[in-house]
Image (spheres, rainbow, N blue to C red):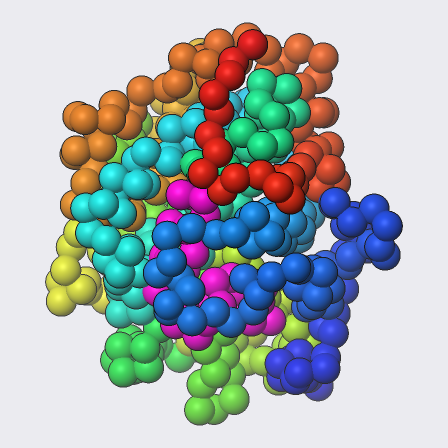
Amino acid sequence: MADYKQRYEENDEGLRFQDLEYVGNFHDLPPVPDGILGDRMMRQRAKSGVLEKVSKEEVLKDEFTIDELNDLNNYLAGNIWDVLVMRATEGESGMIPRQQYEILAFMNEFYRWPEILQMATDEVGAQGIMDIGASARREIGTKVNCVHDWCIGAVGFGMGRCGLLALEVIEPDDYIAESNTILKFMQRILWGKRQDGYILNSQDRYRCQIHESDFLQPLIDQMEAFEQGSPAHDDFMRFNAAAELLSFLDHYDCRLGLGDTGPYPLPNGNILIVRDLFTNEEAYHWSDVCDMENVPHCYSLLLEIDAEAMGLNEIRVNDISTTFTRPKNYIPFVRSGAVFVREKWNTPMSEVYPVAISDLADHLKGVQNATFKLYSKTARMSRRQLITNGLYVYYIDMILPHLRLAGVYDKACTDLNFWEIDRRVSNYYYEIDKRGFAQETVPMKIFSGSGYLPFSDGASVRRSKYFHT
């Protein structure tokens, strides 16, 4: 029997998807579990109202207070833990040094993003940034999505600052003004996208129901029904798996290539997940193999899940755009689907077109051929090249969609040297493998939450860093 709707009742605490617990900066309080209960406990510990539903006027304010910054810091740290423990099985890639490129990217983002994000804000204004977030409500195949928007604050601010603190190259009260710039940009994008007062899916019991109903319905009308085990079901799920694999590989083994929204309730009692798989990012030079196979920028899939037949107890679309369910396997209960193609990132929605499930074979072949070529290309790269490419995926891609829509991507490249790596981060390349920094120290600081040190109560919100030793 499906009882997942109970998770949306006010006093329901949700299920536990794993046994670990989070402490972070709250050493004198009980540890925090994952999921709905964890979100509630973290918000109850806040000193300000920044984690509750906030007004447009609050979002348009120029900066956060110290209490608000600390509340966001603490919540994002717990939220990072919550999503990481669910995907921890990904581990270290056998081909790509992911831990190494991640920590370098984190730190480069914290150093470099503030002036770039401020330039975008100066160009279109605070309302313009919110409008960029809102654009996702009437689009599929857009990277203005959960994971990219979340990464602005959780990764660029949270993990970047955490890494630099762990490396002991900054102090807790350094770069407060820059932290404010990053977090304000994140808040505005996410608030504009959700438009319900929240910024994160976890605050809304892990729902990301952002698409306008009148936009979504014509897409739903094009879904094809099938039975479990039928050729159509198998072809659809096979294509989903193949496109997802390429989206991961093109984005250097990370989730920036995937974006789920939902769950959207359907009139028949089933639920809908909308999934974007970004199979060809033109910003990456290695995506030339995708061009060779005519692989588009994005395939968007609609999946209808029979919640009752599955006995669905809880569904989470978390803040890194990934769907998790209990029971775990929803694939056998997908009852209908549709595939849409967005050729380029800026292809108008009027030119996004469907592909019948019976016509997926040629698309599958192109995806598989591109995947093979990309594996072959990647296998010939040096360790330094792999780490540099991975750094670019995080540092560039996490804010690329926002810069594109603000019309400042080219300006960021020419005026602010967007594709250049900070000299300090380039030098950190030689430090990250010493004493297990990338493999042990940073993961421990991130997973435990102990590395997200708060700002001092009396610190100035305009403080930067004025002294290097």
Where's residue 29, x and y in %? 84, 55
- Which residue is located at x 13 percent, y 67 percent? 350
Q: Quadrant of the N terminus?
A: bottom right
Where's residue 433, x and y in %? 63, 13
- Which residue is located at x 43 percent, y 31 percent? 109
Q: In this view, does 37 lie to the left or right of 198?
A: right
Where's residue 316, x and y in %? 59, 66
Can residue 80 be spotted in the picture?
Answer: no
Residue 191 belongs to magenta span: yes
- Which residue is located at x 73 percent, y 37 percent? 450
State the extent of the magenta-drawn residues as a range. Answer: 180-209
Residue 39 belongs to magenta span: no
Can residue 271 be spotted in the picture?
Answer: yes
The residue closer to the viewer here, 369 or 190, is 190
The residue closer to the viewer here, 48 or 149, is 48
Q: Is residue 149 left or right of residue 418?
A: right
Task: Tell me which secondary structure the magenta stretch mostly adopts.
Answer: helix
The residue closer to the viewer here, 372 or 118, is 118
